[in-house]
């Protein structure tokens, strides 16, 4: 297709009369779908026009670098979705906020609290929660997915509010889960009719069939819970003089104690950041699944851990540079199963041309992380799990250290240092303590595990599966010792 004055759009499937490409947007596995479409068109870009909404899939990393990194000035917006506005997120949520002053203000505060150096100061917090997770893994291994989900939320809530989560049914954790489950499908253009037909927002939520409106209302309820619960807890602890240091408490204290130069906006922004950060979860299902399917990798990882750390203590963050094979596993997990298999939508803020093609202002740009992490010309045999691809022949890490799963340009994941630390300490500690094996049924037969995944908008995760955690007596003792040491403090 062609814009009469500006030139041809990038290649794409032929638009159908009236509805354009509306039927070309499948509801699941969009990554593989548009990777295949791109291959058929022999193009790294795939363009769609859905009822006048321009959509662009980028399948190649070098194109994502050219557009989202080098031309970040005009590719760092977010689309104006009716769902986002109905939720009020266009002004409160850094993830969905459009590019501009407000976003910049939020991003600066997020970076202050989540940059690489600052993240090092959170290591004791991370380790404390990690040890609790290992204890839970000893006592109820069948709930391993829940334990790792609690771990990631607990770390961020401790950093942001000093709020302590110990169990899955903590009210703040429950609210976060409900909110995310309701919100994610609303945000994809095809996920909610509302985004294509914005007037639906004004139809009251009780009209049968208006599912999106009802969803928005429920979502707003859980969002208020998410914001309110940890704040009420923090204010109570501050009143009692019991608050530990956290991003939000530091801001509240500063505002309370300094008579001049208080920034009335600071509290609003840091609260927005704290809330957005604990909406993000670190996904480790892919790691457990990969280990279960590849005992060879577990054995090699354990040999590395044994030779560097030994069996007399648990790993710490100081060990990270000395364990290249563990690092390669982390990189391979993120490549093999990127949690967001399509990057969060960028939106272009000016007309642009690339490689002779016209990309109109307001195009929704999807970096196809699946296609890039499974690009055969970069990763040979991309569907096999093989940490060695990140090592040279001497077992040293190669320079392929950009984790594509964190996205691109100025909007790239601001929590990636915290996420990386949480993933790494989980990987190394679980491997140090356990062998992950197939669970057995009552008759002692191994339970087979399939490779089925769930696709929820941009998120892809492994469907729940069973496994067994086999541990040595020594590992059990080390984990139990952490309980007595930390229980006493
Ligand atoms: C393994 C875990 C994680 C993955 C794979 C991940 C991935 C991503 C991706 C792909 C984006 C969008 C990037 C883009 O637009 O190009 C993003 C944005 C973001 N992430 Fe993460 N993330 C993870 C964990 C976290 C954590 C733990 C936090 C908070 C501590 C966090 C906070 C954010 C925020 C605030 C944004 C929005 C940035 C902006 O729009 O300016 N993420 N993340």
Image (cartoon, helix red, strand yellow):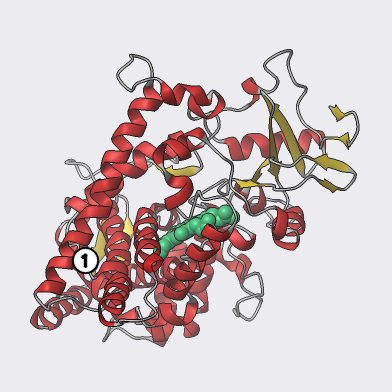
346 with respect to 376 (left or right): left
Is residue 456 at least partly visible in the picture? no
Q: Position of residue 33 (x, y in %)?
A: 64, 34
Which quadrant of the rendered structure holds the C terminus? Answer: bottom left
- State the residue lying farthest toward the front: 260
Q: Quarter of the image containing the N terminus?
A: top right
Front one among 179 and 132? 179
Residue to which mark 1 is pinned: 163
Residue at 81% across, 34% down: 11
Residue 115 in the image: state x and y as whole percent: 48, 75
447, 241: nearer the viewer: 241
Q: Is residue 421 visible?
A: yes
Residue 311: name its quadrant. Answer: bottom left
Q: Classify 434 as above or below 347.
A: below
Across and down, in percent, residue 335 comes to: 56, 57
Q: Secondary structure at mark 1?
A: loop
Horizontal and vertical percent position of residue 262: 37, 76
């Amino acid at each position: 297709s062609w814009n009469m004055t500006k030139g041809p759009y990038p290649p794409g499937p032929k638009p159908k009369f009236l509805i354009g490409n509306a039927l070309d947007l499948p509801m699941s596995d969009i990554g593989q779908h548009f990777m295949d479409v791109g291959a058929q068109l022999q193009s790294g870009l795939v363009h769609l026009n859905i009822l006048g909404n321009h959509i662009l899939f980028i399948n190649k990393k070098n194109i994502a670098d050219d557009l989202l990194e080098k031309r970040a000035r005009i590719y760092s917006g977010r689309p104006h979705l009716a769902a986002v506005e109905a939720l009020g997120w266009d002004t409160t949520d850094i993830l969905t906020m459009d590019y501009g002053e407000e976003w910049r203000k939020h991003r600066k505060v997020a970076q202050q609290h989540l940059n690489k150096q600052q993240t090092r100061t959170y290591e004791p917090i991370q380790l404390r929660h990690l040890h609790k997770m290992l204890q839970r893994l000893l006592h109820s291994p069948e709930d391993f997915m829940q334990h790792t989900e609690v771990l990631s939320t607990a770390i961020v809530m401790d950093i942001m509010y000093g709020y302590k989560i110990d169990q899955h049914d903590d009210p703040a954790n429950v609210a976060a889960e409900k909110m995310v489950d309701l919100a994610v499908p609303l945000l994809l253009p095809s996920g909610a009719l509302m985004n294509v037909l914005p007037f639906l927002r004004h139809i009251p939520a009780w009209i049968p069939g208006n599912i999106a409106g009802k969803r928005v209302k429920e979502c707003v309820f859980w969002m208020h819970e998410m914001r309110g619960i940890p704040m009420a807890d923090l204010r109570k602890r501050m009143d009692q003089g019991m608050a530990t240091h956290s991003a939000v408490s530091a801001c509240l204290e500063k505002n309370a104690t300094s008579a001049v130069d208080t920034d009335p906006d600071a509290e609003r922004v840091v609260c927005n950041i704290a809330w957005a950060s604990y909406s993000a979860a670190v996904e480790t299902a892919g790691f457990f699944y990969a280990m279960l399917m590849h005992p060879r990798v577990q054995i090699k990882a354990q040999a590395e851990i044994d030779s560097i750390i030994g069996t007399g203590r648990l790993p710490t963050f100081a060990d990270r540079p000395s364990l290249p094979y563990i690092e390669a596993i982390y990189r391979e997990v993120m490549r093999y199963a990127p949690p967001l298999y399509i990057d969060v939508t960028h939106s272009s803020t000016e007309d642009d041309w690339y490689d002779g093609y016209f990309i109109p202002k307001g195009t929704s740009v999807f970096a196809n992380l699946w296609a890039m992490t499974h690009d055969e010309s970069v990763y040979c045999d991309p569907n096999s799990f093989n940490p060695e691809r990140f090592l040279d022949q001497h077992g040293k890490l190669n320079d392929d250290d950009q984790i594509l799963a964190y996205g691109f340009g100025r909007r790239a994941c601001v929590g990636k240092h915290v996420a990386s630390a949480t993933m790494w300490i989980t990987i190394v500690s679980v491997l140090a303590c356990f062998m992950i094996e197939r669970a057995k049924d009552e008759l002692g037969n191994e339970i087979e595990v399939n490779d089925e995944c769930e696709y929820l908008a941009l998120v892809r995760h492994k469907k729940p599966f069973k496994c067994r955690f086999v541990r040595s007596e020594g590992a059990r003792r080390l984990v139990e010792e952490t309980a007595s040491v930390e229980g006493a403090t």
